[in-house]
Image (spheres, rainbow, N blue to C red):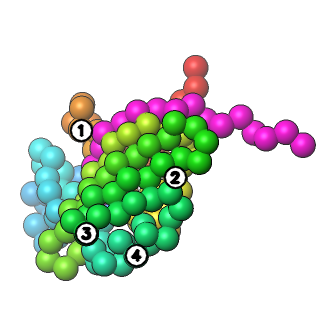
Amino acid sequence: MTNPTPSPLRSFRVNLHGGHVADARENENTAASATVGSVALKPLGGSFEDLCDRLSALPRTHLEPDGSFVHRGPERPIHIDGMIYDANGQVQYVQLWGTVDQCTWQNLVSVLANAQPCELSVQDLQSGELLGLERFESNHWKIG
């Protein structure tokens, strides 16, 4: 049995948020961690301590008390740096940058989102573009 071909490595610099509301002006009751134009970004949620516990359980991951972390891949040049930003008792967003394949990205996002990545938003820090998680992954790892 042959191993499936791994997805290509891609570099990125993004903020991972807990979803977004299309127009912050129309929904003033939404707790927002930040805004991009008129789009309110929701907090990622969960406590700083819980997220740190989940990250500490990942192999090849080093976590500092200030919320910065590094995750390395087992064989390929996979390297992800991150920083957790929290306020008011919950994680607001996580900044991520590095070079990674899609499988490693998805595993890390699952840990960051506590296995509930359905409504996450990804803000590309180079272009400023804000996308849903699936759209970001589709755009980022498309082949061809």
Check residue 58 for magenta coloring: no
Residue 33 % position (x, y): 17, 62
Residue at label 4?
53
- Contact between labelled residues 4 and 2, with CB atoms less than 8 Å apart: no
Q: Is residue 32 visible?
A: yes
| Amino acid type, label 2 | Gln
Disc 2 residue crowd, few under 14, some 14–19, many 20+, Cα 10 Å: some
Q: Is residue 42 visible?
A: no
Q: Nearer the viewer, residue 4 or 80?
A: 80
Magenta residues (range): 1-17
- Lower position in the chain sequence, tag 1 or tag 3: 3
| Amino acid type, label 4 | Asp
- Residue at mark 3 to residue at mark 2: CA–CA distance: 24 Å
Residue at label 2?
106
Residue at label 3?
65
Q: How many marks?
A: 4
- Lower position in the chain sequence, tag 1 or tag 4: 4
- Lower position in the chain sequence, tag 1 or tag 2: 2
Disc 3 versus disc 4: nearer the observer: 3
- Lower position in the chain sequence, tag 3 or tag 2: 3
- Lower position in the chain sequence, tag 2 or tag 4: 4
- Taking the spot 58% from the left edge, 20% from the top edge, the residue there is 144
Occupied quadrant, residue 65: bottom left
Residue 44 % position (x, y): 30, 65
Q: Residue furthest right?
A: 1
- Contact between labelled residues 3 and 1, with CB atoms less than 8 Å apart: no
Residue 25 % position (x, y): 9, 57
| Amino acid type, label 1 | Leu
Q: Nearer the viewer, residue 17 or 21?
A: 17
Q: Indicate which disc residue 125 carries.
A: 1
